[in-house]
Image (cartoon, rainbow, N blue to C red):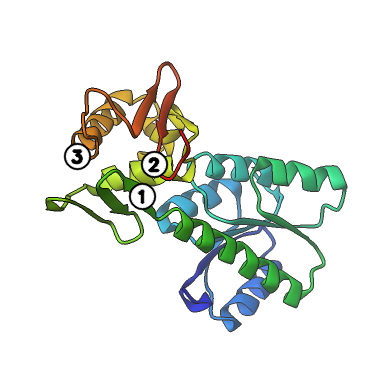
Amino acid sequence: MTEAMHQVLIIEDEPAIRAVLRVLLEAEGYRCIEADSAQRAEIETRSHKPDLLLVDLGLPDGDGLTVIRRVRAWSPVPIVVLSARTMEEQKIAALDAGADDFVTKPFSAPELLARLRAALRRNVRSAQQDSVLQLGALRVDLARRESSGPAGELHLTPLEYRVLECLTRHLGSIVMQRQLIREVWGPEREDDSRSLRVCIKNLRGKLEPDPREPRYLITETGLGYRLRADEEPS
């Protein structure tokens, strides 16, 4: 993927700074969308699914940290903070909230562009590393949305692929039920555990040698689910 294909959401309440950032990024081949408030940032993130967020921490209707936490609850999108806040504890708070990097204002254009490229590269490498699952005789390619086994092609629905993608990002670890629902269905469906249970049941029917005794899609009672692949140690 080249920079020309990347879409960046600029979250900044100062029109002049947004204009400078847009000119800088578009000159490098990025596509830009803008948000001037925390509320608008969440709307644009959900509607456009940008490849990277460039976030100012001082927004008129809230703190950028809140935006980062809310987005990070359902999306792994790279987040780079661009802020005039220079205190070490403020940088730590942003990184702890889920930001990938922190650039201070006033900023150097070459440095900012280098930080964005690095964040995007890390995200692409992570996606590539986690894109193929080997589950016994079955092979699931999440990037290509292709699955196959001894009997040939295996059909998974887009919803089932999204559930697997979320579990794969945390391979071997427990993913809380509400986190899964937020990432796949959205926060407005957070209490809809039935849809998740139905999806997991259908996935087991397609992927497990014996769906009654799951080997790969493990239920962690009272918590959520855990995905195990054959490459993972028992």
Task: State the residue position of label 3.
Answer: 206
Q: Is residue 26 above or below residue 191?
A: below
Disc 1: CA contacts within 10 A as few (<14), some (14-19) or many (>=20) = many
Locate the C terminus by quadrant: top left
Q: Is residue 32 above or below residue 139?
A: below
Q: Residue at x 45, y 53 (%)?
A: 130
Amino acid at the residue labelled 3: Lys
Task: State the residue position of label 1.
Answer: 133
Residue 169, image x, y percentages: 47, 45
Q: Do the residues bearing badges 1 and 3 touch, measured as CB atoms within 8 Å?
A: no
Q: Kindly report the distance in space between the C-alpha atoms of the residues bearing marks 1 and 3.
A: 14 Å
Residue 100, image x, y percentages: 66, 53
Kindly give the residue lying farthest to the top in the view shown: 222
| Label 2 or label 1, whichever comes before in sequence order | 1
Q: Kindly report the distance in space between the C-alpha atoms of the residues bearing marks 2 and 1.
A: 7 Å
Q: Is residue 204 in view?
A: yes
Q: Nearer the viewer, residue 233 or 20?
A: 233
Q: Residue at x 41, y 40 (%)?
A: 167
Disc 2: CA contacts within 10 A as few (<14), some (14-19) or many (>=20) = some
| Label 1 or label 3, whichever comes before in sequence order | 1
Secondary structure at numbered mark 3: helix
Residue 16, image x, y percentages: 70, 70
Secondary structure at numbered mark 1: strand
Q: Nearer the viewer, residue 104 or 62?
A: 104
Task: State the residue position of label 2.
Answer: 229
Q: Is residue 63 in view?
A: no
Secondary structure at numbered mark 2: loop
Amino acid at the residue labelled 1: Leu
Is 194 situated left or right of 229 in this image?
Answer: left
